[in-house]
Amino acid sequence: MRDEIIKGLKKQGGQSVLKNFELIAHQLRVEPNILLKYLRKMLAMNIQISEGKAYIVGGIVTVSDVEPIIKMFINKYVLC
């Protein structure tokens, strides 16, 4: 999973873009909106989805910011 996040997370202007957001949701077998809601809450940032990409508006995030949140999501909602 870390490789997917690293490959997909790019900086673009004043925001970060998780280019393979829908692929990550698909691999976890969850609806993208559920993962989106969790990321919004945990990052406390506005995140928009467009064309399968998650645009994190209002800040730059790194893999070390996003990876632990996705791992918590997996432990709490996927591995139950």
Image (tube, helix red, strand yellow):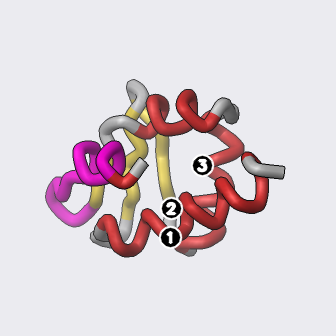
Vertical relation: 4 (above or below) 38: above
Nearest the camera: 37 or 4? 4
Q: Mark 2 and 1 residues: CB-CB less than 8 Å, in contact?
A: no
Neighbours of disc 2 within 10 Å: few (<14), some (14-19), many (20+): some
The quadrant holding residue 63 is: bottom left
Q: Residue furthest front?
A: 79
Q: Residue at x 15, y 59 (%)?
A: 13
Q: Are marks 3 and 2 in contact (CB under 8 Å)?
A: no
Q: Which residue corresponds to mark 2?
A: 46
Vertical comparison of 22 with 17: above or below:
above
Depth-wise, is mark 3 or mark 2 nearer the camera? 3
Tell me the element at label 2: strand
Q: Amino acid at mark 2?
A: Asn
Point out the frontmost of discs 1 and 3. Answer: 1
What crowding class fits label 1: few (fewer than 14 Cα within 10 Å), some (14-19), or many (20 or more)?
few
* Residue stretch rendered in magenta on the structure: 3-15
Residue 26: percent from left, percent from top? 56, 28
Question: Which residue is tagged 3?
Answer: 36
Q: Amino acid at mark 1?
A: Pro
Q: Amino acid at mark 3?
A: Leu
Mark 1 lies on residue: 68
- Measure the C-alpha gap from mark 2 to mark 1: 18 Å
The spot of residue 45 in percent (x, y) is 50, 68
